[in-house]
Amino acid sequence: MRLISYQSNRGVRLAASASNGYVDLNDANPEIPHCVKRFLVELSQDNTMFKRVHRAVETGRSFAASLDELMNDDQPYQLLPPVPRPEKVICIGVNYADHAAEVGIEVPNEPVVFNKFVSTLIAHGDTIRLPKVSNRVDYEAELVVVIGKRGRDIARQDAYDYVAGYCCGIDVSARDWQKEKPARQWLLGKTFDTFAPLGPELVLKDEVPDPMQLNIKLRLNGQVMQNSNTNQCIFDIPALIAYVSQVVTLEVGDLIYTGTPPGVGDMRTPPVYLKPGDTVEVEIESLGVLKNYVM
């Protein structure tokens, strides 16, 4: 199942992909929540929810035929990030061995963790806005995990029970802030507004049998810049969930950006940084293509 969140004149709504477009689940069945986080809570607690949702998708009336229609400014609705307001945006650094070699860092023996603020999130089709105070804004293609059940001290073997699904993501990074400021400002370098595109849909885990075997690539203006597979991750999803949940309680809707493969712009000769007019696309097998523009 594939879900989107969108803004309408009734507020934020939840829709699912159907054969004829997107169906508003709450319109099709008023018992289904219109909030994605509330939906995920009920999905984890109610064994009948899947059947009700599938029935709603089959019988509901579509309100938009495609993502392109949702992105049309003439429409009375707006596509949002699949999880519009997560409590936490957790990010993993240096999680591909070949990327560690690329940046000259030893392969870590524990995950490298940082975070972004929620104000970084933008949807498929939205614009990455380059800050005036940075001249080295870079791209990073990432698989994003969406948490579906609240948990703390989660055992590795139980980790997938706490996963709702997956999205494509871009960890946009101001390298001059990340690397050149006092004490290396990872947080500030990673958390300028619009620096975390997410989408295009939330693909629930029933459609992704093995998230650690997905081709992942990034194209900049049509040119492939990153091309790898999630099987190259140093720490897999269960390891990340177990590690992070030792420290913080993971809440429904929390996001984990799981790291990027090699090919980032800062390590190229000459370096390649984002500039106004660029188009960035992240394509992950089974998850679709996340496209964003640069201004």
Image (cartoon, grey):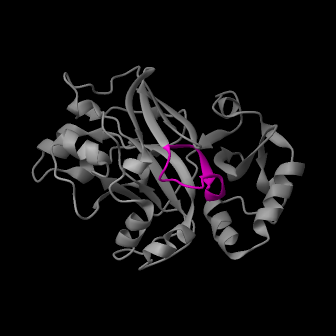
Residue 132 visible? no
How many marks are shown on the rendered structure? 0
Drawn side of residue 154 relative to residue 52, left or right: left
Residue at point 82% right, 63% down? Answer: 52
- Estimate the x, y position of residue 144 in percent, counting from the top left: 47, 51
Drawn side of residue 260 relative to residue 40, left or right: left
Q: Nearer the viewer, residue 51 or 101?
A: 101
- Estimate the x, y position of residue 200 in percent, counting from the top left: 58, 41
- Estimate the x, y position of residue 177 in percent, counting from the top left: 19, 42
Q: Quadrant of residue 276?
A: top left
Residue at point 33% right, 44% down? Answer: 192
Residue at point 78% right, 54% down? Answer: 25
What is the residue that sits farthest to the bottom in this orientation? 153
Which quadrant of the rendered structure holds the C terminus? top left
What is the residue that sits farthest to the left in this orientation? 182
Looking at the picture, does residue 282 appear above or below residue 239?
above
Q: Which residues are drawn in magenta?
A: 197-214
What is the residue that sits farthest to the right in this orientation? 59
Looking at the picture, does residue 70 appear above or below residue 224?
below
Residue 91 visible? yes
Drawn side of residue 263 relative to residue 133, left or right: right
Residue at point 25% right, 65% down? Answer: 110
Indicate whether residue 200 is drawn in magenta: yes
- Estimate the x, y position of residue 246 in percent, counting from the top left: 35, 77
Looking at the picture, does residue 186 appear above or below residue 268?
below
